[in-house]
Amino acid sequence: MNKLILDETILIFTDGACKGNPGPGGWGAVIAKPDGHVFELGRGHKNVTNNQMEMTAIVEALHALGQDPGDVAILTDSTYVIQGITQWIWGWMRNGWKTASGNDVSNKELWQSLLTAVQGREKIGKISWHYVRGHRGIEGNERVDHIASELALGHKVDLYDGTLLRYDHDIHNIPEDTSLPERKEKPSGAKKKAYSYLSYVNGELKIHKTWAECEARVRGRSGAKFKKAMSASDEQQIKEDWGLS
């Protein structure tokens, strides 16, 4: 269990949104300091992906902290970002920013910016990473989701900057367990059902429910790619490996 200790910790909630993926996007962040100062950040962008906005939110929040002392807890609903910055990035760097399948890592420049921001912050205080499930009533997450989504739509958002006492959102109401969900192991001898099948033909990605549909699309097509995904995160990683989002 990844339990968050609130005392003397700077809380950062972040989220990203995209309408089209790629398409118009936005990111949002809420920073709450132990001295009771709370402020919000956010910005809209034109042609971006959801993952790019998720990472940008964290980079911008860490930059906004500057040299303020203290440990930082980053709370996000993106397993992609947490796994990427704590696990995958080291292998990518060893491989010359290539994935395990030999493709270029998507969003390389943003990953490098995020790593630089994290390593710079860790000279001042520790950073801990916390997963919060989206759309579960966690007020800090709901607020940054609202900021990111509204900015992605081109709407104006009034960003708060003031005391915790006057802030309308109970951002300290956080689940006890903020660790990444464990991957369930399949029973011994049982064959796990595929989550989806992906095909990539002539620059167009399609996701299929059955292998028969996928096979029919790629059979005889020169340069076609296809792969089975066992989970939503596996599906996302295949897209990243293929240079897609």
Image (cartoon, rainbow, N blue to C red):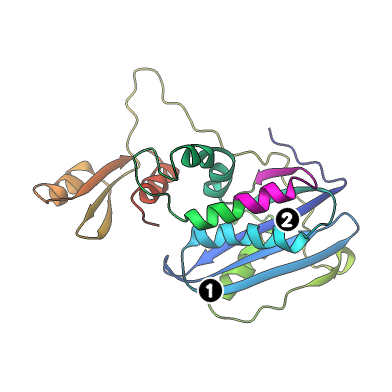
**Taking 158 as reference, is 25 left or right?**
left
Q: How many marks?
A: 2
**The C terminus sits in image quarter:** bottom left
Residue 69: percent from left, percent from top: 85, 52
Q: Residue at x 55, y 46 (%)?
A: 79
Q: Residue at x 80, y 59 (%)?
A: 32
Amino acid type at mark 2: Ile
Magenta stretch bounds: 115-130
- Disc 2 target residue: 12
Q: Secondary structure at mark 1?
A: strand
Residue 238: percent from left, percent from top: 36, 46
Q: Secondary structure at mark 2?
A: strand
The answer to which of 90 and 235 lies nearer the viewer is 90
**Taking 241 as reference, is 135 left or right?**
right
Q: Is residue 155 magenta?
A: no
**Taking 177 as reference, is 46 left or right?**
left
Mark 1 surroundings: few (<14), some (14-19) or many (≥20) residues within 10 A: some
